[in-house]
Amino acid sequence: MTGTEGGAPEILVRFDQVFKSFRTSRGRRQVALDGFSMSVPTGAVVGLLGPNGSGKTTALKALLGLARPDRGTITAFGRELPADQRFVARRMGALIEGPAFTGSLTGEHNLRLLGELHGARRDEVADVLELVGLDGAAHRSYSGYSLGMKQRLGVAAALISRPDLLVLDEPMNGLDPEAVRHMRELLKRLRDERGMTVVVSSHILSEVELVSDWVTIVRNGRVICDASVPELLARGTSRLVVRVHDAVTARSVLTDHGYTAVPAFGPAGAELQVEPPATRPTPSDGSDVLRLLTERDVYPRELVVESASLEDIYVAAVRAADAATATARQEPRHGT
C-alpha cells in the first residue's frame, strides 16, 4: 500500500455517510446503504465482506455510477462522484454481477471487440489473455468455456482499458478450488507487478484473508469494520485447542475449574476448544490447562494455541452489530 509521510495509507476511494434506498415492487422503501463509510487505500487489495443483502453490490454500483446515492459523498482519484464520473470511469475497470459475452465468438474475438472501444492493440489483447491464463483457450468459443474461464474473461475485459482501480463483485463465486487459487494469484500479480488497486467482494473468507491487505465488513448497509488485515487479526483473541483421547473427562475437569470447553471435531479428530474464566486468563502456552488435566491423569495428545482467523473476527463483528441493533430496537423512544 502507498503510504503518507506519517505512515498512514494514501486513500484512493472514500465513501462518507452514503445513503441509498430503493422502492420495492410493493412500493415499500428498502434501505440498501445506511450511512455507509469506507476507505480504499492506494495500491491495496481490499476485501469487501458481508452477508447477502448487506449492501456490498450497491456500494460498488454507486462507485461505478450505476446507482446514484440519495445523500453522502463518494470521492475517487481526488474527484467527487457522480459529478466527475466520466473522468473516474476512464481509470476504473469492473466486473459486476457476472460477465456477458457473445457465445458464438471466441474469447479472443470477444475481447478484441471490447478492446477496440478502448483503443487496445491486438498485442495488448493477447497480453491480457495471457495475464488471466486464457492464452491457451483464446480461440475457443465462449459458449464452450467453463465457469472459471468465463470469470477470467470477465476480469480480462475489466483490465483491457488498463485501469488503475479494479472492482470485482464475487469473482470467485462458484469456482472450483483450482480456479479460486488462480484468481487469488492473479489479484496478487495485479497489485504487485502492475501497482493496481483492487476492490473485491467475496464470501470466501479464507481467500480474502490470503489475498487482501485491507478488509471492510458490511452489515445492513453499514460498515462495521474497516481496517488493515494485520490490525484486524491483532484484535482477535487466540484460542486454546486441546486434542485428547478422553474428551469427556477432560471437559469435566476443565469445567469444574471454570473453563469453557466446547467439543469439536478437527482434522486430527476429537478436540476441545477451551476458553479461560474471565477472572483467570490462560497463559499463552496453555500451561495451566495442561497442569489441571495431568493432575487428573488426563494426558492430551496435543495442545495448540491458535490465532484468531479472519472468519472468527468476521463472525464476532457481525454478531456484535446484530446485538447492538437488537438493543437499539428495544430501547424506549422518548417523546412519542
Image: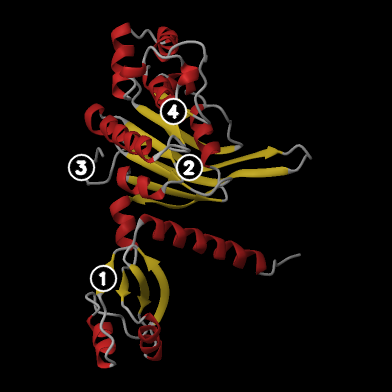
Return the disc, 4 or 2, that comes first in the chain's sequence: 2
Residue named by callout 3? 5
Q: Residue at x 51, y 41 (%)?
A: 56
Residue designated by label 1: 304
**Which numbered disc, 3 or 2, marks the residue that appears first in the sequence?**
3
Question: How far is the residue under mark 3 from the one under mark 2?
Answer: 24 Å
Residue 74 position, x and y percent, is 48, 35
Which amino acid type corresponds to the residue marked 1 in the rendered image? Answer: Val
> Disc 4 designates what residue?
151
Choose the circle earlier in sequence order: 1 or 4.
4
Task: Identify residue type, mark 4.
Answer: Gln
In the picture provided, is 167 more to the left or to the right than 73?
Answer: left
- Sequence order check, earlier mark of 3 and 1: 3
Between the residue at mark 1 and the residue at mark 4, the CA separation in whole angstroms equals 39 Å
Q: Amino acid at mark 3?
A: Glu
| Tag 2 residue | 16
Q: Earlier in the sequence, mark 3 or mark 4?
A: 3
Location of residue 333 by image quarter: bottom right
Residue 279 numbered mark, or none: none
Q: Looking at the picture, which amino acid does disc 2 mark?
A: Asp
Does dot 4 land on a helix, a strand or a loop?
A: helix
Q: Is residue 264 or residue 204 the one in the foreground?
A: 264
Q: Is residue 89 above or below residue 248?
A: above
Quadrant where the C terminus lies?
bottom right
**Mark 2 / mark 1, whichever is N-terminal:** 2
* Element carrying mark 1: strand
For the point 46% across and 46% down, the residue is 203
From where the camera sits, is residue 91 visible?
A: no
Q: Do the residues bearing badges 2 and 1 touch, measured as CB atoms within 8 Å?
A: no
Q: Are marks 4 and 2 in contact (CB under 8 Å)?
A: no
| Up/down of 283 relative to 326, above or below | below
